[in-house]
Amino acid sequence: MELIRELKFLKGNTKGRIFIICFRISSGIYKHKILRYLLFFVRIFYTIIVQWCLGIDISDKTQIGFGFNVFHGQGLVINEGTVIGKRVTVRQNSTIGNKRDGGKSPVIGNDVNIGANTCIIGEIFVGNNVDIGAGSVLVKNVNDNEIVVGNPARVVNVKTVSL
């Protein structure tokens, strides 16, 4: 039921829908040890369709919240240790991960918009309601409601939140 609600949220984004269907099924299978071995062919299908055909390298072990939206997707790489909140949008050629093998990965809050060709690297926290401009390299924490751009990314504006 949750998957159907999520697909309605992604209306008009065919590639994003294909990705989220494959990801949620493969991720669900991975969480159950017995199913992981019985349905290994589904996870192989995920690898072929999502990683090879769509060019989206996101492990089915990654924690992704409801409403994850991928625009274009090609060249998108997200490390399996990354935690992504709800209603996050990511564009093509972005990398989200750790600095070295075994290192800590980023935690991304809710309602975050990540521009194309963005790098978010290391043990950092991105707050809620954040916009990250295209081509940014993020290596430090970002507070809620901020807009960051550049290499290295810097805060250029703070959104006003009306109640």
Image (cartoon, grey):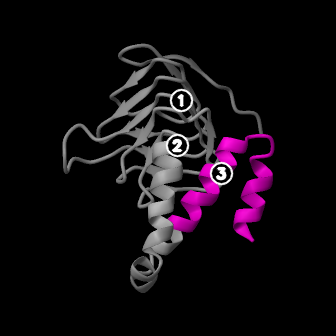
Residue 53 is left or right of residue 87, and the answer is left
Residue wearing tag 3? 18
Specify the principal SS of the magenta part.
helix
Q: Say which element carries label 2.
A: helix
Q: Say which element carries label 1.
A: loop
Residue wearing tag 2? 53
In the image, farthest residue toward the bottom: 34
Measured from the top left, where is residue 136 in percent x and y?
44, 19
Indicate yes or no whether the magenta region holds residue 90.
no
Q: Residues within 10 Å of mark 3 (few under 14, many from 20)?
A: some
Residue wearing tag 1? 92
Name which of mark 3 and mark 2 comes first in the sequence: 3
Q: Amino acid at mark 3?
A: Ile
Q: Residue at x 33, y 28 (%)?
A: 139
Name which of mark 3 and mark 1 comes first in the sequence: 3
Q: Amino acid at mark 1?
A: Gln
Q: Say which element carries label 3.
A: helix
Query: Camera-side residue: 63 or 148?
Result: 63
Bounds of the magenta segment:
1-26
Measured from the top left, where is residue 158 in percent x and y?
59, 22
Query: Camera-side residue: 22 or 160?
Result: 22
Q: Quadrant of the C terminus?
A: top right
Measured from the top left, where is residue 146 in percent x and y?
55, 27
Name which of mark 1 and mark 2 comes first in the sequence: 2
Q: CA distance from mark 3 to mark 1?
A: 16 Å
Q: Nearer the viewer, mark 3 or mark 2?
A: 2
The reply to whether the C-beta atoms of the residues labelled 3 and 1 are less than 8 Å apart is no
Q: CA distance from mark 1 to mark 2?
A: 14 Å
Residue 120 is left or right of residue 161, and the answer is left
